[in-house]
Image (cartoon, rainbow, N blue to C red):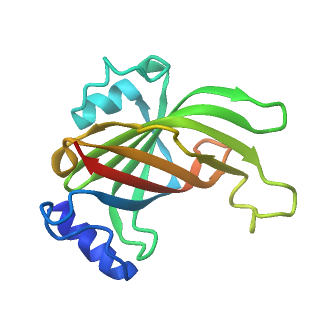
Amino acid sequence: MNIKKVLSVVAVGLGTGLLSTTASAAPDMSLVLQMLGEGTKVGTLADVSKRVGVDLSKKDLGFALTEFECHEMPLIDPATKMTLGKGIDCLAGITPDGNGGMTLTAVSVFMLPGGVIMSTGKASVAVFINGVGSGDGQRTHVTGGIPATDNIVAATGDFANMVGKSRVSGMLRMGGENLVFDCLFVIDLKHV
């Protein structure tokens, strides 16, 4: 399945052109993706890197690949709720802030039909203010991260030779056996 065809359908569903239909018409693209659901533990970033065929051993991610704990969940189009692939969020360097929140380093893996995109970044996680924003209690924390510089560390397939930024905003349910993710990613890519 060609990722450009899938995402072109998604773009039509959104009513906007996220992608052109051919790479030569507009080589740059923006993707809006959502990691949504209970994250299943899938090992370390070393395991995930091997699984997706991307060698991250020479990348400076701030921590050893084996220090990242990874969680896999569905990757969807937030407008249509169509499942596009799998998302894996790998977390390391979790530092509590004393108020129930934390800072951490994340490597996010977007496994799409046309290839894989991997980004890294620092994120903050804060507890919902009691009675504000947590809705039905299914989410316990808010999270976000905006990179100052390009943070795409690897891209394969239709995304090969592309660089760019991935930013995240979302909610989590922490505690219990598995984390629950409801995180929206905006990924801006350009050919090099």
Is residue 50 shown left or right of residue 185? left
What residue occupies the far right of the structure in this picture? Answer: 130
Is residue 95 shown left or right of residue 7? right
Looking at this view, is 175 or 191 the one in front?
A: 191
Q: Is residue 175 visible?
A: no
Residue 22: image location, x then y, percent:
13, 66
Looking at this view, is 43 or 122 the one in front?
A: 122
Which quadrant: the N terminus? bottom left
* Vertical position of residue 53 compared to residue 131: above or below: above
Residue 48: image location, x then y, percent:
34, 33
Looking at this view, is 120 or 192 the one in front?
A: 192
Name the residue located 30 percent from the left edge and 59 percent from the top edge.
29
Looking at this view, is 42 or 170 the one in front?
A: 170
Which quadrant: the C terminus? top left
* Vertical position of residue 153 compared to residue 133: above or below: above
Name the residue located 31 percent from the left edge and 18 percent from the top edge.
57
Residue 153: image location, x then y, percent:
34, 34
Q: Is residue 98 visible?
A: yes
The count of marks equals: 0
* Vertical position of residue 26 compared to residue 53: above or below: below
* Vertical position of residue 130 compared to residue 92: above or below: below
Which image quadrant for residue 52? top left
Residue 175: image location, x then y, percent:
69, 42
Name the residue located 87 percent from the left edge and 63 percent from the top edge.
131
Name the residue located 35 percent from the left edge and 81 percent from the top edge.
13
